[in-house]
Image (spheres, rainbow, N blue to C red):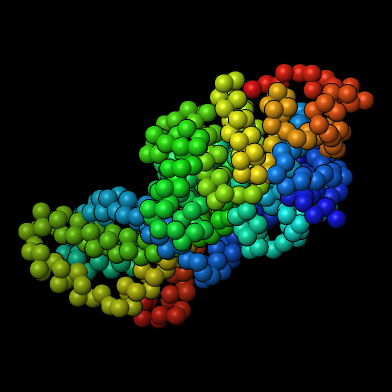
Amino acid sequence: MGTVVLHGAANWFFQVGEFTFFCGRALRESLRPPWEISEVARQLFEVGWRSLPLIAAAGMAVGAVMSMHTRASMERFGAESLIPTVLALALIKETGPLVTGLLFAGRVGAGIGAELGSMRVSEQVDALESLAVDSFKYLVVTRVVACMIAMPILTTVMNFLGIFGGFVAETAVSGMTFDLYWNRAFASVQFVDYVPSTLKTIVFGFLIGSLSSYLGYYTTGGTAGVGRASTRSVVLASLLLIVVNVVLVKMIFFFFPGAVQ
Amino acid sequence: MENSAAIRFEHVYKAFGSLQVLADVSFSVPAGEAFCILGRSGAGKSVMLKQLIGLIPPDQGRIYIEEEEITGLPPRELPRIRKRMGFLFQYSALFDSITVGENVAFPLRRHTKFPEEKIQQIVHDRLEEVGLADHTRKMPTDISGGMRKRAGLARALALEPSILLVDEPSSGLDPITAAEIDNLLLQLKVSKGTTLVVVTHNIPSARRIGDTLAVLHQARILAQGTAEELDRSPHEMVRELMSSQGGT
């Protein structure tokens, strides 16, 4: 029993170390030419553009639901006029980045894990190497960079559509005009609210891209291994995102004290 | 000094955990000849092939490609060597997200500055050589196993390599298609002087293609020579293997 626990712990530490090394290599290689621009663009289309409908729909729904809940709370204090402001701040500072990250981890993390895993077990990764192509750079770095670019853009879409969804819910109840809602929503939003929380999603993109690529790139065990890589990509990326978010929020408070207010 | 050796394996060892796959394996393949590696499943034949292209490093020993040692080369140096070699994988390993034609064009787009018209011409020529000129726009999942193998061969030959490594060319194929692949390989050797290293279970195919045959058994090369020499081998296992028809 003790041996099994020790073996499990050693294996866990080994994997964490290997993943850390993998992340470092991905970062280093992303700065070294050739930059595989056409492949990054293709991946950006796959992970970014194709995620847009999901993010847009989720943004609208999350905004509408948040607006309804906020109204229920604000009515108690007679502060309904603050609904747009509260909703905008909540979405931009935390809900938007985190929900986008979790949805992105689900859709893109699973896709990358399964695709690279499938390429590994069918020897397509070896085939790339045999054709004198650096498979790490071509498959991993391009996907990680695409995730890092896509995440802040998708988060911005989520934020704005969330606010719009909130407007739809609010106007259905109170008849508030779009101009008034929009002005109130952004009256209290400052640079320090938007930029750090949106930029932190670049880190989310890096983690989702790296972790799912790591699990896919080193897949073993045939089709069952591909399934495992896909599932673990979603579960571990989501978990990592939630944990790292705590650290990033603390760092934002430290480096941007204005974001606390 | 074997000036004309396209490939040299010198005292190569490889183990995966406690499993010794290769132990003190040495051989050389003269340029323009076909070298067939025979042996039972799991004997380490495919490992040898992947070592030749630097996909699996040996634990000990040296590997030379056209008199240049590749063991110990930094990873960034390997592509330069690999451009001179082609690899036909057992299950073709075609990129399944792009068409057959794009698979063949892939190495040309990566490693040459040819204009698109010339690339398309080469793609057409290679696919015509393997009888797939009409299937350029098909996806790899939409063609048969034998066609995938031929498409894999066309891709491996796109850059006109001087050395071609072939892993189980006839596995999973019917005897007629397997013979067609053998003929294509023979044609390459004769008309273009390509050096072939072929891993196979198929003895009739090895007899047809190979100038030299080697039998890998229990991590070592048990016997090496022409098919006739192996027929007279003192090792019973070698004679038994040579007298079998081999699976296709």
Relative image position of residue A231 (x, y in whole percent):
50, 43
Extreme-front residue of the structure: B191
Q: Is residue A152 above or below residue B141?
A: below
Quadrant in which the C terminus of chain B is drawn:
top right
Q: Residue at 62% across / 30% down in the picture?
A: B182
Q: Residue A21 falls in which quadrant of the image?
A: bottom right
Q: Is residue A21 left or right of residue A142?
A: right
Q: Residue at 62% across / 27% down in the picture?
A: B171
Q: Is residue A133 above or below residue A3?
A: below
Relative image position of residue A42 (x, y in whole percent):
38, 55
Q: Is residue B118 left or right of residue B150?
A: left
The answer to whether one can see residue B114 in this image is yes
Extreme-right residue of the structure: B234
Question: Residue B44 or A111: which is nearer the viewer?
Answer: B44
Q: Residue B175 falls in which quadrant of the image?
A: top right
The answer to whether one can see residue A111 in this image is no
Q: Residue at 49% across / 42% down in the picture?
A: B126
Q: Is residue A218 above or below residue A148?
A: above
Question: Residue A55 or B101: which is nearer the viewer?
Answer: B101
Q: Residue at 72% across / 41% down in the picture?
A: B33
Quadrant in which the N terminus of chain B is drawn:
bottom right
Question: Residue B224 or A33: which is nearer the viewer?
Answer: B224
Relative image position of residue B78 (x, y in whole percent):
65, 58
How many numbered markers are drawn? Answer: 0
Relative image position of residue A99 (x, y in whole percent):
36, 56
